Structures are given as structure tokens and as C-alpha cells.
Amino acid sequence: MPDDQSLNAWARTLPPAAADVVARSDLAHPHVHMRFPATPAQVGVARAQVTEWTRRLGLPTVHGQDIVLATDEAISNAVEHAYPGDSGTLTLFAARIQPDHAVRIIVSDEGEWRPPPENPGFRGRGLVMMERLAEVFELAHTPLGTTVVLGWPATPDSRADDSDLAVPWATHDQ
């Protein structure tokens, strides 16, 4: 894991919202900070790191799965789109932030943003998935690359409770 000095240097290259996440991070608790090649083989490695991190935080399984899936989409999009024809690197950061211990994930690349096609066909749903899975979804494009910030509350909201999914049965007196 990179040291605090490299974390701070990286944070200075980020858009303000992402830099704020790093500044407010509680590094005394489990966190992830890794820089890795933007290759398909590394997506699984990063996913395993985030999965283990959610377990170390003691998050409920369903909440952790939403976090892992949204993060996986952000990483996969960067691997596929950030470096057309070239190789590059990605940075993943996951931590709780102060003062409320909300969960935040940052995925950043140093590549070029390519807008999604108007008709993505059966693909191209990653941004929509991230937005729906996370309470916070911010996407920023700068000359230094693309940064995604994903966030969830400290504890999952009532969406994790299956009771609101029950089908109300109408009764009719005859």
C-alpha cells in the first residue's frame, strides 16, 4: 500500500470533491489505496481488495455487494475506455470519511474521457449502474484524467431491508 506522502501527492491532482474525500478520510481504520495497471487482469485484484475492505469494516453483505459492484463498474470502465491503444494506470482509494464515517470510493485514471455513445446497445450501462447503486456519484473529467467518487452512508438505509419489497395483498370483503 502506498504511504501517506504518495496519497497526499495523488490527492493534489484530483478534482476538489475527490481531494476533499482524501482530506476527510479516517486512515486509522481500514482503507485501500492502490495504484495498478489498467488491464482486465487487474480488475479482479482490485475487486478482491474492495470486497475484503467491506468485510473488515463489518458492513452488511448486501451493502458490501453494492459497493463492490459499483466500484467494479468504475474500474472496468476506466480499463476499457481511458487508454485507447495505450497502457496506463488506475488509482483506487476506499475509506471512511469524517465526521460521520460514511463510505467513499475514488477511482481515477490519467487517460482521456470518451463520452458514451448515444445508443450503447446491450452495453454501456456502467454509469447508470454506479449512479443507482451509490448514494453519492460524482464524475469529473480534467486534462489530468477522469475521476469517479462513489459514496454510501455509514450504515445502509432502509433499501437493505427487504420488508419494503413485500407485495401488499388486498383483501376484499364480499
Image: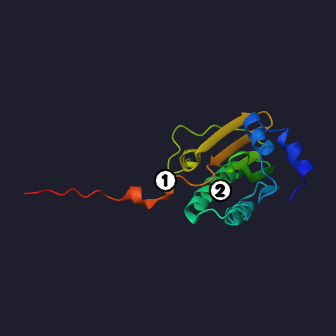
Q: Earlier in the sequence, mark 1 or mark 2?
A: 2
* Mark 2 residue crowding within 10 angstroms, few (<14) / some (14–19) / many (20+): many
SS of the residue under disc 2: helix
- Looking at the picture, the colour scheme in use is rainbow
152 on left or right of 43: left
Q: Quadrant of residue 155 in the image? A: bottom right
How far apart, in angstroms, are the residues tagged by discs 1 and 2?
23 Å
**Which label belongs to residue 30?**
none
- The residue located at (53%, 37%) in the rendering is 118
Counting from the top left corner in percent of width and height, residue 154 is at 63, 52
Q: For mark 2, what is the residue?
A: 72
Residue extending furthest toward the left: 174
Counting from the top left corner in percent of width and height, residue 40 is at 71, 59
User: Quick check: can you spot residue 29?
Assistant: yes
Counting from the top left corner in percent of width and height, residue 6 is at 90, 49
Does 158 appear above or below 9? below
Q: For mark 1, what is the residue?
A: 158
Looking at the rendered structure, the kind of residue marked 1 is Ser
Does 133 appear above or below 19? below
128 on left or right of 172: right
